[in-house]
Amino acid sequence: MKWARAAAIVFLLAVSAMCLLANVIAPASYAHQFRDDPNASPSRQHLLGTDDLGRDRFARLLYGTRVSLLLAPAAALLTSLLAAFIGGTAGFVGGWVERCVMAGTDLFLSLPWLFLLITVRALLPLNVSPMVSVLITFAMLGCLGWAGAARIICADARALAQSDFILRARASGSDGFRLLWRHLMPNLKPVLYAQFWISVPVFILTEANLGILGLGVAEPLPSWGSLLRELESFSTTSAQVWQLVPLILFIFVVSSFHLVLTKEELQV
Amino acid sequence: MPKLAAKILITVLIGGFLGATLVRFAPGFGVDEEELDSRLSAGSIQALQATRATEPNLFVFYFRYVKRLLHGDLGTSRTLQRPVLQLVAERLPETLKSVALGLALGWSAGFLLAVAIVMSRAWYLDLLGSLLVGILLCLPAAVLALLFVLAQAPSRLLLGLVVFPKIFRYSRNLLARSSALPHVLTARAKGLGNTRVFAWHILPTAAPQLLALFGVTVSVAFTAAIPMEALCDIPGIGQLAWKAALGRDLALLVNLTMIVTLVTLVANSASDLVGKTFRVSEA
């Protein structure tokens, strides 16, 4: 499946490049309203038509994809760092610290993910700007997603803490933070790498769920959640197939993220 | 058993305390849309805030909450103006019905497909199953719900589609690993039939881990119930949670999260217990 992995990486790079160049490629800003042209069909000017407010769908797709493709990896990075810190320290220190941290992790894992997210989302102030709302949404995903990864990292760190090279490092006078930072963490990199790539599609899917429920990124800033929400107005009788483009792109992007990891990396 | 019950109780109490802390110190606590009404004077806003003023001490706040909880009082929903307990009692059966149906469907479809693939070793079936699961894993539950509404399909089947890919992937990997074990190969070499090899040698090895997955799928199904009920208009606790989130009804939201956490914990513990009993009887 090497070719599938290579194709997925090329596809992700191409989509990312297009989104980063959204300012150049898109015919207008994501919020610009063509008041004379609401609900327009695809044309040379509007490749995917316009929505009911006259906003160019292609521009919104590019900017929305950019939001998800930039911030989901950022949230995954935050999750991986938190998991590395919490799980790594617990596994390395062991004893009651590990037991307490793992009990906390179990508690966190028992909480229903989406219930927790919408609770935290509802706790935020009302008067936040769209940009702040998008940052909060992804920061929230990053802060709440660490538990599963921390368990795996803790188990690995525990095994590593008892390995020969750590014993040798201890014998040569390394201890505490230096041992953790210089010897343990570099050896946890493969697990962290796998956890990072697993988290990215999970966060993209969760943001989409929140967005469709109206609890994600605030308008007029587009995100995949708000773009997919437009499917509500999709009519099977007068099918406007171009409305399905965000969904198709979404499926391709998420499956590409699934394909990035090899079987061996997934089993790390 | 008492140890397990104590563990669940402690977990729920700590979870409740964390929930109460989150609510009490959240930036949006005690704030709602009314305060953004520009027609209201500073005095009116202050009066509004005074009506929502609660105990400033977190521990007293939580103690009072637990005391009320022990008397069977979960508080009153601010948005719906009804006791939370009454709302939950009305809506929980709907969600439990959907979750039960979804789990039954997801488990039977996922497990049967995995068994068919592992036992037949047909590449085309494996490819078909992997493609189907790959697509389903890329679709958020909310999109599936929208597609169900558009297709006018029975919405309760949706949870089955959400659970199915997880069951299929895990069971296929587990059964494939079990079927490659030396004692299974020996049994095959001795001429045992497919059904007998599966029932006597593959399934008992994989069963404890499969049972452990049950608890996880309960949590997955409850989580997917929010978009399903919200978008397909099913009056369950998922829809209630969604309405509470839109209306910033924190008391209702935290209570719902606690109830679902309790159900998830019980399901997880039950599946662990059954798995352990199974292992002991196997040994």
Image (tube, coloured by chain):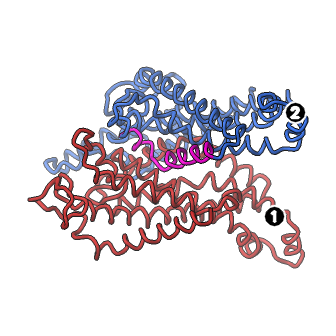
Chain colours: A red, B blue
Q: Residues within 10 Å of mark 1 (few under 14, many from 20)?
A: many
Q: Quadrant of the C terminus of chain A?
A: bottom right
Question: In the drawing, does residue B149 fall left or right of residue B167?
Answer: left
The structure residue drawn at horizontal position 47% and vertical position 24%, both measured from the top left corner, is: B92
Rendered image quadrant of residue B193: top right
Q: Looking at the image, can residue B53 be seen? A: no
Magenta residues (range): B124-146
Question: In the drawing, does residue A7 fall left or right of residue A214?
Answer: right
Q: Is residue A262 magenta?
A: no
Q: Residues within 10 Å of mark 2 (few under 14, many from 20)?
A: few
| Chain under callout 2 | B
Which numbered dot is residue A124?
none
| Chain under callout 1 | A
Q: Secondary structure at mark 2?
A: loop
Q: Quadrant of the N terminus of chain A?
A: bottom right
Residue lying farthest to the bottom in this orientation:
A172
Q: Amino acid at mark 1?
A: Ala
Q: Are marks 2 and 1 on the same chain?
A: no
Q: Determine which residue is flagged by label 2.
A: B191
Q: Determine which residue is flagged by label 1.
A: A161
Horizontal and vertical percent position of residue A168: 88, 74
Q: Is residue B141 magenta?
A: yes
Horizontal and vertical percent position of residue A222: 31, 59
Q: Which of these two is toward me, A86 or A253?
A: A253
Q: Main secondary structure of the magenta part?
A: helix
Residue lying farthest to the left in this orientation:
A36
Count of picture labels: 2
Q: Is residue A163 above or below residue B79?
A: below
Horizontal and vertical percent position of residue A132: 35, 62
